[in-house]
Amino acid sequence: MAKNSSAFQCSECGWQAAKWAGRCPECQQWGTVVEAGTASGIVTRIRPSTVSEDRVARRITDIRTVEVERWSSGISEFDRVLGGGFVPGAAVLLSGEPGVGKSTLLLEVAARAAREGRRVLYVSAEESVGQVRLRAQRTNALTDNLYLAAETDLATVLGQVEAVSPDLLIVDSVQTVASATVDGLAGQPSQVREVASALMRLAKERDLPLVLVGHVTKDGSIAGPRVLEHLVDVVCHFEGDRHTALRFIRALKNRFGPTDEVGCFEMTGDGIAQVSDPSKLFLSRTGSVPGTCITVSMEGKRAIPVEIQALVVKTSAPNPRRVVNGVDASRVAMLLAVLERRCGTTLSDHDVYVSTVGGVRLTEPAADLAIAIAIASAASNWPIPETLAAYGEISLSGEVRPVTAAPHRASEARRLGYRKLLDSAAGSLRTALGMARSAAEPVVAPEF
Ligand SMILES: Nc1ncnc2c1ncn2[C@@H]1O[C@H](COP(=O)(O)OP(=O)(O)OP(=O)(O)O)[C@@H](O)[C@H]1O
Ligand SMILES: [Mg+2]
């Protein structure tokens, strides 16, 4: 008899083998290799079942639309990312690094919904109810309609939902709840899949908005099976720098709204506060100074002015230093090359330092022009007027190229009082530098 050569199969990627393995050699996931069961090569014929009258496929134009009824999370910055608020029956996955503030944010959401008269069940599978209450005391989130349960067993969590019958369910986190019907420890792909699908089924049945907290792995992706992101309706990522209190939430996927929105928050001792106008957070200077130029960066649909600072110091070291903070090092190297070849600013015997203010990271090429102006101004020590802002991508030929959402950037810059805007209209970096420099000089009234 022919031996079955693929008795085991990876439930993640479909890799097959004769022997069981703890870790799939194909997709590197632990605990996903399971007995293939019926995957023995025998193909069973599936009989089509009769479709009842009320379930038969209909013309799309005959289907009546039901307006999605959203309700606000009580935090407008979070609503912005959700596409307007919670949708009944929809599942939101909120992922983020350890300690970034996921539990703090959701406790705030829970408290606000509870104060609006909704029953909220917060299932904490990571902390005891006492710990959550302590946090609630600190962040002023104590309210009667908020129910807490510290459970790690899926069946008990489902039971709690039956008992409390909430209007909003928060499970913190999906990786720490486990089902007794599935093998493996909590957090393993098969467990995460089972827990997420059981909770989502319940949420859909009860028209209950569900928020799941998700852990991230070392490389920043959501821990557990990839299928988790496919299952849920909205995937939000909560991000922030350890050294600053600023936090951003971005929607990576949203079945009910756009994914280019960003919510802006600040962690404080009293919990999490929303920042509705982040425009002034990344600005520090006062007056016209050399080596400091403002650019306007896009965070989702928002234009945010960011200050870029440069410092140029003469050195006799054979390899001058290029130290960057918040901008891309290779982009700065390219801009130094363009400055040398196209504008005659040679910095091969100078150390160059470039940094953003407030720990913000700029990844857009639109910041090129402001970086180049800041470096050129620091090199020749001419002050950049405080009313100047610049954005534009710089090509290797020294041209200033147009950027996306230019009108939006311009209007935000004008709102904050930047009257002189440099962009692709300047044509070349050389001209843009000339314009920035002439704007710096005091205007002398013509004598008649
Ligand atoms: N007593 C306190 N005063 C001020 N800030 C605090 C206090 N306790 C905690 N924090 C802040 O809250 C953050 C932790 O928030 P939170 O527990 O919500 O994070 P989390 O993303 O849920 O983390 P985890 O992944 O561990 O569950 C800390 O990093 C700290 O900045
Ligand atoms: Mg937490």
Image: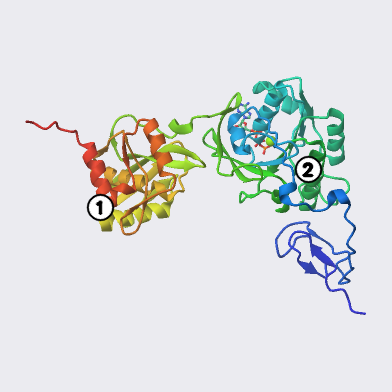
In the picture, measured across the screen, residue 316 lies left or right of residue 106, that is: left
Mark 2–mark 1 Cα distance, whole angstroms, equals 60 Å
Q: Position of residue 245 (x, y in %)?
A: 54, 32
Q: Amino acid at mark 1?
A: Thr
Q: Tell me the number on the disc at residue 200.
A: 2
Closer to the camera, 56 or 261?
56
Please, which residue is most extreme toward the right here? Answer: 1
Closer to the camera, 279 or 80?
80
The answer to whether residue 194 is seen in the rendering is yes
Q: Tell me the number on the disc at residue 108.
A: none
Q: Position of residue 432 (x, y in %)?
A: 27, 47
The answer to whether residue 20 is seen in the rendering is no
* Ligand 2 in which quarter: top right
Please, which residue is most extreme toward the front here? Answer: 62
Q: Position of residue 141 (x, y in %)?
A: 68, 22
Q: Secondary structure at mark 1?
A: loop
Closer to the camera, 249 or 314?
249
Q: Is mark 1 within 8 Å of ligand 1?
A: no
Work out which quarter of the rendered image holds the C terminus and state it: top left
* Sequence-wise first label, 2 or 1: 2
Q: Position of residue 159 (x, y in %)?
A: 87, 35
Crowding near the residue tagged with mark 1, few <14, some 14–19, many ≥20 C-alpha atoms within 10 Å = some
Q: Secondary structure at mark 2?
A: helix
Residue at the spot of label 1: 345
Q: Amino acid at mark 2?
A: Met
